[in-house]
Amino acid sequence: MQTLTDGYRGMSLILTLNWDRILYLFTVGFALFMGAYLGAYLQ
C-alpha cells in the first residue's frame, strides 16, 4: 500500500510540474488534426 501511495504522489508531482507541456502536446495534435480535416474538406 505504501508503494502505491508513493507512486500516486510521484505521478501527481509529474503532472503538476508538466501540465503545460501536456496541454501543448494536445494543442499541437488538435491543430494538426483540424488542419488535415479542413484540407481534405476544402479540396
Image (tube, rainbow, N blue to C red):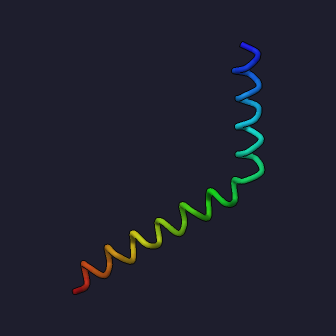
Q: Where is residue 12 in the image (x, y as percent from the top left)?
A: 73, 38
**Outermost residue to the left:** 43
Q: In this view, does 16 lie above or below 40?
A: above
Q: Which residue is drawn at 71% across and 13% down?
A: 1
Q: Is residue 6 above or below residue 42?
A: above
**Outermost residue to the front:** 3
Q: Residue at x 77, y 41 (%)?
A: 13
Q: In which quarter of the image is residue 8?
A: top right
Front-lying residue, 22 or 3: 3
Q: Does 37 sit left or right of 13 as displayed?
A: left
Q: In this view, does 16 lie above or below 24?
A: above
Q: Which residue is drawn at 74% across and 22% down?
A: 5
Quadrant containing the C terminus is: bottom left
Q: Does 41 sit left or right of 1 as displayed?
A: left
**Outermost residue to the bottom:** 43
Front-lying residue, 40 or 7: 7
Q: Residue at x 73, y 45 (%)?
A: 14
Q: How many labels does the image show?
A: 0
Q: Does 14 sit left or right of 24 as displayed?
A: right
Q: Position of residue 40 (x, y in %)?
A: 25, 79
Q: Position of residue 7 (x, y in %)?
A: 71, 28
